[in-house]
Image (tube, helix red, strand yellow):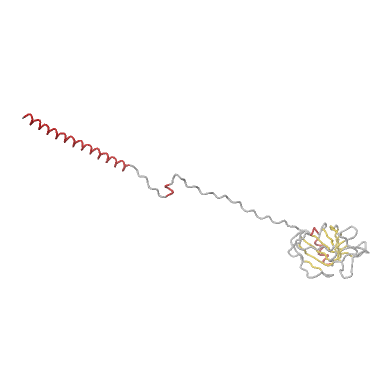
Amino acid sequence: MLRAACDSRSLRQTGKEKTKTLDARILLASGFVALAAIAGVLVVAAAPEKPAPASLAEARLAAPTPKPAQKRAQKPALPPVPAKDEPFVIKRILPIKGAIRYGEWHWDDAGVPPGPIMVTVDLKARVISVFRGGYEIGAAAVLLGTDDKPTPLGIFPITQKDRNHVSNIYTGAPMPYMQRLTNDGITLHGSDVALGYASHGCVGMPDAFAAKLFDTTKLGDKVYITRGKQVGLGDNLVGT
């Protein structure tokens, strides 16, 4: 009986000890769990936070912003090449109303730039014209040769000039402002230009006009003598 009572007490004590041991283990396990939780919180708190991107461009750092395309420097436009000035293309004709009568002449070189001189004589119109660089500066009615002594057609350079020339062929006839065209006596010179008068093939013109022409030309300037050849603005005098 005593023995049984002792065993019963021992069993109760053993059960209590087991209960204490189990409570201790549970408590210890709860402590580890709590420590692990605390450690996790500390680790999370210690980890640096990545700042939120300030913009969409910053969020896409992997794709660099393309550089703006550089504009090619444009070459300056070249100035237009000026058209070549043709000195023998007609640029102006004197504004003369109607046909030029015998003894009539016109001269206007105001504002006309320097340029080569060319003289034209139209046997049909019986008119002489003077051009400087393509600008007509003078025109006059002229005397011409007869059928027996015609004024020749062609292109004639001026080979001699004599302001007070006297003919050595026609009995000492005065030929003021003479400009020689041929070696057989054809010249430009001053004359009394009137209806019914004629020359021996020379081109006669009013003395005042002949004086201006004499002062304008030089040796080598050409005289174009044609018959009925009409020219106008833009035409080339060389083609007369």
Q: Residue furthest left?
A: 1
Report the number of discs: 0
Quarter of the picture containing the N terminus is: top left
Q: Pick the residue in front: 224 or 190.
A: 224
Residue 85 locus on image (x, y percent): 73, 57
Quarter of the picture containing the C terminus is: bottom right
Is 26 on the left or on the right of 78, as rendered?
left
Residue 3 locus on image (x, y percent): 7, 29
Q: Quadrant of residue 189?
A: bottom right
Q: Pick the residue in front: 14 or 231.
A: 14
Residue 80 locus on image (x, y percent): 66, 55
Residue 20 locus on image (x, y percent): 16, 35
Is 74 on the left or on the right of 236, as rendered?
left
Q: Quadrant of residue 37?
A: top left
Is 58 on the left or on the right of 181, as rendered?
left
Q: Residue furthest right?
A: 171
Is 19 on the left or on the right of 230, as rendered?
left
The answer to whether residue 221 is above or below residue 209 is: above
Q: Quadrant of residue 228?
A: bottom right
